[in-house]
Image: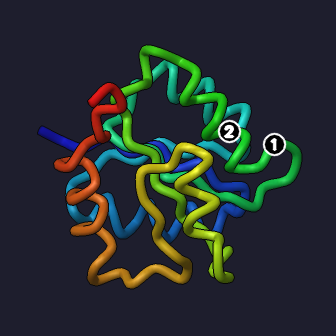
Amino acid sequence: MTARILYIEDRNDNRLLVKRVLMAEGMEVIEAGDAHEGINLAVEHKPDLILMDISMPGMDGYAATNEIRRLPELDAVPIVALTANVMKGDREKSLEAGCDGYIPKPIDIDRFPGEILGFIQKGRPNEHS
């Protein structure tokens, strides 16, 4: 099975790096340049995991995560914040917004694919337990 990753990120250079690293490991990467496009692509493609940049113009990653979490058809899809927001409390804020994980930028290209696969295998915690 090929993992399908949706990366919502406004900076093209960041999307290109992540795409190259994950495609080298056999993963499919769908790119969205802003939150609205990302939400639409998430509904259309039902990815195995969504990587969410937090600092984007217009709708930020917190709001986009909140919107995605309102869609029942995407309830089982893990969302991982991939962000340069690394101040004290940023990780917690991402998790409170509905993210299932947090990876700070810059990424460690050697560890990154394994981290992504780990989040996919772990899935989302059952919110009803």
- Left-right relation of 128 to 43: left
Per the image, label 1 sits on a secondary structure element best described as loop
| Residues at marks 1 and 2, CA–CA distance in whole angstroms | 7 Å
Above or below, 88 relative to 93: below
Q: Residues within 10 Å of mark 1 (few under 14, many from 20)?
A: some
Quadrant where the image shows the C terminus: top left
| Amino acid marked by disc 1 | Met
Question: What residue sits right under mark 2 in the picture?
Answer: 64
Q: Tell which of 86 and 29 is nearer to you.
A: 86
Mark 2: amino acid: Ala
> Position of 81 compared to 87: left or right?
left
In the foreground, 11 or 48? 48
Q: Indicate the secondary structure of the residue bearing disc 2.
A: helix
Residue in the picture at 46% in, 15% down? 72
Q: Residue at x 62, y 24 (%)?
A: 40
88 or 58, nearer to the observer = 88
Relative image position of residue 79 (x, y in whole percent): 46, 46
What residue do we see at 46% from left, 70% from top?
103
Q: Is residue 31 above or below residue 105?
A: above
Picture quadrant where residue 2 is located: top left
Extreme top residue here?
72
Residue under label 1, please give it: 59
Determine whether label 1 and label 2 are within 8 Å by CB: yes
